[in-house]
Image (cartoon, rainbow, N blue to C red):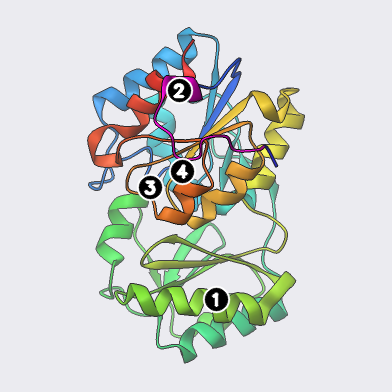
Amino acid sequence: MTARSGQGANTAANKAADIALVISDVDGTLVNSDKRLTAATVAAVGRLRAAGIGFSIASARPPIGLRGLVAELGLDLPMGAFNGASVVRPDLSTIEERTIPEPAAREALDRLCAEGLDVWVFARGAWWLRDPHGDYTDLERRTIDAEPRVVADLGTLMGEAAKIVGVSRDHAHLAACEARIGAALADRATIHRSQPYYLDVTPPHLDKGGFVAWMSAHLGIPPERIATFGDAGNDRPMFARSGFAVAMGNAEDSVKAAASAVTDSNDADGFAHGVERFILP
């Protein structure tokens, strides 16, 4: 882990040096609350490219949810989907992919249901659920630009699940579920909230930090020359494996504390401002 000096500082003295690659989270970071890329964000990625700095994304989204970003940002490097459990090319073809071991997936499904959460499953390249009108389904449709598939028994998908999501409008309850289910599944699955209302279950020992390490090896760029941007707990492993980490202004305090610097919120062009303040030479 790279030492964090002046955590959360917004000063020029805390500027990154000699960055060759930027990896950003998407929701809550790269896009605004309307799930849109702003002109400033698109321009910031262009400025990185002009400066010879590579750019990629690491997201809890399924690969299909990254398609629009590839087109708008002209992405040309591998991307991390499902919190790094899947690595895909810009054409969304798979480089590496892991699914949740079936016993752990079944236990996760049972525990999420027992907590009274709505449950979604991402498997077979699709988004599956039981109630197409449940909480946040309209938001997810807009986020990944895809319609869910309705199935009566989610258990039939447990041998092929890349991600299982517990969904709730009770954010405090979901945070408590994260701790309980994370402890119960221990090293058999990775448990992180990707948003205050989404609790993600993904394959064990794989997270966004692993994707940073994969990109470092794949591109031959040492971790200290990689910068990362994020806003949620599932971005902290990414921060820990990169040389310079920028937390969004809308991030939780624990995420800000794990970062090298803090930028503005995702609704105030925080990514673009962070690139300008901390990354570009």
Q: Earlier in the sequence, mark 3 or mark 4?
A: 3
Amino acid type, mark 2: Phe
What residue is pinned by disc 3? 27
For discs 4 and 2, the disc positioned in front in the rendered view:
2
Distance CA(mark 4)–CA(mark 1): 21 Å
> Mark 1: few, some, or many residues within 10 Å (few <14, many ≥20)?
few
Distance CA(mark 3)–CA(mark 2): 21 Å
Q: Position of residue 58 (x, y in %)?
A: 53, 42
Q: CB of mark 3 within 8 Å of CB of mark 4?
A: no
Q: CB of mark 4 within 8 Å of CB of mark 1?
A: no
Q: Name the residue: 55% across, 10% down.
A: 52
Amino acid type, mark 1: Ala
Q: Earlier in the sequence, mark 4 or mark 1?
A: 1
Q: Which residues are magenta?
A: 3-14
Whether residue 135 appears in magenta in the rendering, the answer is no
* Res 100 label: none
Side (left or right) of 239 relative to 257: right
Judge whether 18 appears above or below 64 on screen. Answer: above
What residue is pinned by disc 4? 230
For discs 3 and 4, the disc positioned in front in the rendered view:
4
